[in-house]
Image: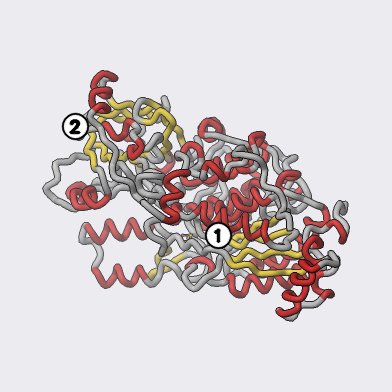
């Protein structure tokens, strides 16, 4: 049902009035070759495109944006491409997480400051999904998320290669002398074979799946491989549909409820999601407003009920996203999860999640498992608390060796990445598989930007003994394609004086995942003494974006948003006046 009229379109404020400002808007649109037939009475659709020459996962967006435009035109809209930060996970240093909020701010202000009625967001590489969605949520206009789609499975001499996961595997093999330098170089050229984002269940696949579960994508969109012609047609359909959303005034505020985000948690658990999902989803829900806000406990609760049913690496053993698509994809998986989902949640299709799942079928029950034959009976993530992490930390039990789920061992502590790297490469390091490696000062402020250093390398000495896993604790994140007994996101982080800053090598640490506990076996008195002698590290930034980042970034358990971007911060931002 249409709620908007041509006169009430937001863009009409720019283009319709008979005044000198609008003369400027119209004459300059005409400078671009457009005319009244392009804009009068037509929804103006921003296509926010994260393509660039360095956006490795979005190489097809240069073409795909034309497909979205085609859809917008078919439906009677006026498409305008607005480029935004690419945020290539594999090339941005020190970490894209430093810039997620920058993309969010860019997206929000692009939409607010221009004559835009609705938006298609083109992203897919890890932080682009949350970055774009965070900004669009705050801008409040109707939007559709168009996921880049996973790349095809890697292949090296007939062996399937998975993004990230096989990088770590073959790197360990090379360090252990099991493959040659030549073979390593061949793997390098075989692991990323097509356009699209990482095709393991890393952060990219996790976040696009979450976007679909929240209702931000067209049904089934997140699983379509980037180079499949279905992806082209999906892009055009995004363009057509967003025009309808504008007329229907289907804004995020009218679409979203807490159920949307609870559904996303459920789906994340069933996917065997990246640990990064927690940070991004918490931030997204808080942007949607206090009534939608979720926290760490919601993940932990869901993880106790929802089994991992997507048999995709790294939680699964064999399959990749291409297989997931052929098995029926996200619609099929959500169909299996029906009883765990709130099916009345609204989506960008204008229909409920339940409507979107009608007729969904699983075509391969080994890839998308039934609930009674999961790959892991409990969910993907567990939230631990204790004196080492009063505000929580997370572990992915589905990706770690069972013996470490309950373990007490001596800490081996590193204050920074280079010293950890040098030590773990030293074959004479005094370490056993019972040790717990601790890396600190790599949280949101300390990293800076919370780099993906949480999968600390197994010390070379142990690799050569055949050790494949050990407990590791940090205030960093880890790549969604990583695996192992890695405890991450310790909050508060060491850099701001969390108890992690007070651990000494040799201290005993107890980890008990079934009890959701992490405990530093040092008395409160001794910790207080150590705190009295603790002094903060020098500031990471004295100017620029990093300076602003350091002042406003929140801790991992709160989603690492900037405090001033949260919905509850200050009065709402209105429309631009003139
Ligand atoms: Fe872009 Fe992995 S590098 S999704
Ligand atoms: Mg990643």
Q: Residue at the location (56% across, 36% down)?
A: 306
How has the structure been colored for display? secondary structure
Few, some or many C-alpha atoms within 10 Å of disc 1 (few <14, some 14-19, many ≥20)? Answer: many
What numbered label is drawn on residue 124? 1
* Residue 255 x %, y %: 74, 45
Decide which of tag 2 and tag 1 comes sooner along the chain: 1
Q: Is mark 1 within 8 Å of ligand 1?
A: yes
Disc 1 element:
loop
What numbered label is drawn on residue 568? none
Q: Nearer the viewer, residue 326 or 460?
A: 460
Residue denoted by label 2: 506
* Gap between marks 2 and 1 measured at Cα: 42 Å
* Residue 89 x %, y %: 45, 60
Q: Residue at the location (39% across, 69% down)?
A: 156
> Which residue is most to the front?
20
* Image quarter in which the C terminus is found: bottom right
* Residue 12 x %, y %: 81, 62
Q: Is residue 48 visible in the rendered structure shown here?
A: yes
User: In which quarter of the view is residue 131 placed?
Assistant: bottom right
Q: Nearer the viewer, residue 167 or 242?
A: 242
Is 421 drawn above or below residue 44 in the view shown?
above
Disc 2 element:
loop
Tell me: 80 left or right of 396: right
């Amino acid at each position: 049902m249409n709620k908007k009229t041509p006169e009430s379109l937001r863009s009409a404020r720019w283009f319709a009035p008979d005044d000198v400002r609008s003369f400027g808007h119209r004459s300059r649109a005409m400078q671009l070759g457009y005319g009244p037939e392009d804009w009068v009475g037509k929804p103006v659709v921003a296509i926010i495109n994260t393509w660039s020459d360095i956006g490795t996962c979005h190489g097809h967006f240069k073409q795909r944006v034309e497909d979205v435009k085609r859809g917008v035109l078919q439906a009677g809209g006026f498409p305008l491409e607005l480029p935004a930060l690419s945020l290539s996970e594999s090339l941005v240093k020190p970490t894209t997480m430093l810039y997620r909020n920058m993309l969010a701010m860019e997206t929000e202000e692009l939409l607010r400051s221009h004559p835009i009625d609705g938006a298609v967001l083109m992203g897919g590489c890890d932080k682009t999904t949350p970055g774009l969605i965070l900004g669009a949520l705050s801008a409040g206009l109707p939007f559709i998320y168009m996921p880049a789609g996973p790349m095809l499975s890697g292949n090296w001499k007939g062996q399937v290669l998975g993004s990230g996961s096989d990088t770590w595997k073959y790197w360990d093999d090379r360090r252990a002398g099991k493959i040659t330098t030549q073979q390593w170089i061949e793997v390098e050229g075989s692991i990323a074979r097509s356009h699209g984002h990482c095709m393991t269940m890393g952060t990219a696949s996790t976040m696009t799946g979450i976007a679909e579960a929240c209702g931000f994508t067209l049904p089934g969109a997140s699983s379509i491989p980037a180079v499949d012609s279905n992806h082209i047609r999906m892009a055009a359909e995004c363009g057509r549909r967003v025009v309808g959303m504008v007329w229907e005034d289907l804004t995020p505020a009218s679409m979203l409820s807490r159920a949307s985000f609870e559904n996303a948690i459920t789906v994340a658990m069933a996917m065997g999601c990246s640990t990064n999902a927690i940070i991004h989803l918490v931030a997204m829900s808080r942007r949607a407003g206090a009534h939608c806000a979720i926290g760490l406990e919601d993940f932990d609760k869901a993880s106790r009920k929802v089994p991992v049913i997507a048999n995709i690496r790294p939680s699964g053993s064999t399959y990749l996203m291409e297989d997931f698509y052929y098995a029926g994809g996200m619609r099929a998986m959500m169909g299996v999860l029906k009883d765990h989902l709130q099916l009345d949640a609204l989506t960008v299709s204008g229909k409920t999640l339940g409507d979107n799942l009608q007729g969904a079928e699983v075509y391969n029950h080994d890839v998308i498992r039934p609930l009674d034959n999961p790959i892991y009976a409990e969910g993907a993530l567990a939230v631990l608390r204790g004196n080492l992490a009063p505000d929580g930390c997370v572990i992915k039990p589905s990706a770690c060796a069972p013996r470490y789920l309950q373990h007490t061992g001596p800490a081996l502590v590193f204050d920074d990445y280079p010293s950890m790297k040098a030590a773990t490469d030293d074959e004479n390091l005094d370490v056993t598989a019972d040790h717990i490696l601790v890396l600190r000062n790599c949280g949101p402020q300390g990293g800076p930007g919370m780099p993906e250093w949480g999968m600390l390398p197994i010390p070379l000495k142990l690799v050569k003994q055949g050790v494949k896993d050990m407990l590791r604790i940090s205030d960093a994140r880890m790549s969604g394609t990583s695996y192992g007994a890695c405890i991450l996101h310790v909050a508060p982080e060491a850099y701001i004086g969390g108890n992690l800053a007070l651990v000494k090598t040799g201290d005993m640490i107890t980890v008990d995942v079934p009890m959701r506990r992490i405990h530093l076996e040092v008395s409160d008195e001794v910790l207080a003494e150590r705190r009295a002698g603790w002094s903060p590290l020098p500031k990471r930034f004295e100017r620029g974006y990093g300076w602003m980042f350091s002042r406003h970034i929140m801790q991992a358990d709160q989603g690492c948003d900037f405090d001033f971007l949260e919905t509850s911060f200050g009065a709402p931002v209105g429309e631009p006046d003139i």
